[in-house]
Amino acid sequence: MSVQTTSSYDALRAAIVSGEIAPDARLVEAEVSSTFGMSRGAVRTALIRLEQDGLVVREPHRGARVRKVSNEEAVEILQARAVLEGLAARQAAERIDDPGKEHLAGCLARQRDLLERGDLLGASDANADLHAALLELSGHGTARRLIHALHSQTVRYQYRTILIPGRSAASVEEHAAIVAAVIAGRPGDADAAMRRHLFNVAHAVRLQFIPGDIDKASRGTL
Amino acid sequence: MSVQTTSSYDALRAAIVSGEIAPDARLVEAEVSSTFGMSRGAVRTALIRLEQDGLVVREPHRGARVRKVSNEEAVEILQARAVLEGLAARQAAERIDDPGKEHLAGCLARQRDLLERGDLLGASDANADLHAALLELSGHGTARRLIHALHSQTVRYQYRTILIPGRSAASVEEHAAIVAAVIAGRPGDADAAMRRHLFNVAHAVRLQFIPGDIDKASRGTL
DNA sequence: GTGCGCAGGATTGTTGACGATCTTCGCAAC
DNA sequence: GTTGCGAAGATCGTCAACAATCCTGCGCAC
């Protein structure tokens, strides 16, 4: 029984978000309790919180399992993120200062650099950094909370979208447009650019993972 | 011990959302347990869920209290709702059918009628109905979940905004624009109209409840 | 072979009691 | 009057045991 450095909730959450525990896997309280070295009560409360987060599903007397987000739902989540991050970008463009400009430019340059070297995983991380930086700069606590929750439901998809041919390159250009608008202090453009970017990702996911949905796919355009 | 028709979570939630329990009020487990006629364990799990919902704050060994959303945060929440409901309106405009059109037109007519009779409370309810109808028509489950959560954090404000002079009348016209765009099947216009509407509400809240914030208030424009 | 009922096992839900922690209040020292 | 200390009360957190429920597999009738 080691000293509990992280709460049971965080530990379980990390395991689920990282994919260490597969989607749709059962989460038997006693089992989780022993493998994570925490009491059943702690597991219970963690599961309840995670259910409210939308990361696990619990059915009465039937236990909990990791919630499996369908491809259709992933598209919905990306759409919701698109408008919320658009709001954040808008506000970031209103509040941007010099250190913020530097930071954004640095993130973008790093992503571009990593992509040129063919480091897709690294570029994906830089991507996440940029989004996080924009969120931070926006100072919009509500948007940040919501986006964070949505994001953790779809990290699993992150590793799939970067493999779509041409997506990474397009992504960098879209990011460049966002950063340019924010740095220039043009809220409307920043919002539009961010929405375009994430709607494009949603569009790509739809085309890639939802076969036979070509007509609906045209909706992806903003 | 009557048969439990509603879960403890729903009962507590309703009490908080309706304002029956005041913001910042302490929620002692034993106390809530006896007044609501449910076990302490049930109260505990309900509080945990409500914390994740953002309706309650819990501090270790110090108990739970109803979360008090500041005026600033109310503005943030309205902004987030604006973009999410914009997304929903957009999608509703894409999927609208004849029964849906009738329903929307009916809601709008009812609101207009109630307002002309000076029934502000009734008009506010009709307002909520219209938003709910649009959400339903959008078929966007993710947006619906998020908006519902955000909405329950600010219902308390609903009764304040309608008292702002001129807001109700403006609100009806804004709704008319939304409904018109959705019925005409113009997604972009529906999105814009909805955003304009809720950003206006946010703007009004800011002007009314956040004194000395006139410069920032200009941001309310879309 | 197929469907049905029934017992056994597995898992969750609930309860009550106990320990841990925080807060409050009184009291004494300065 | 103020500050510091300590004990008592209040409240939360945890644990173990029990009850309730669901799932599985087997035997039996048809």
Image (spheres, coloured by chain):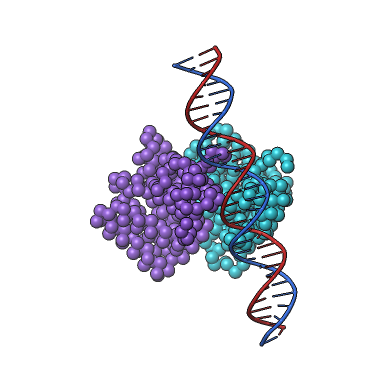
Chain colours: A purple, B cyan, C blue, D red
Does B207 appear above or below B145? Answer: below
Q: Is residue D6 left or right of residue A146?
A: right
Q: Position of residue A95 (x, y in %)?
A: 46, 65
Asked if one can make out residue A151 in the rendered structure from this viewpoint, the answer is no
Does B1 appear above or below B215? Answer: above
Of C11 and B12, which appears nearest the observer? C11
Q: Position of residue D3 (x, y in %)?
A: 64, 81
**Which corner quadrant of the image does residue B164 belong to?**
bottom right
Residue at 33% x, 48% y: name it.
A162
Q: Position of residue B63 (x, y in %)?
A: 63, 59
Residue occupying the far left of the picture: A117
Q: Is residue A58 left or right of residue A206?
A: right
Residue at 55% x, 63% y: name it.
B217
Of B191 and B41, which appears nearest the observer? B41
Of B207 and A168, which appears nearest the observer? A168
Q: Position of residue C27 (x, y in %)?
A: 74, 78
Residue at 73% x, 42% y: name it.
B1
Does B93 appear above or below A183? Answer: above
Asked if one can make out residue A36 in the rendered structure from this viewpoint, the answer is yes
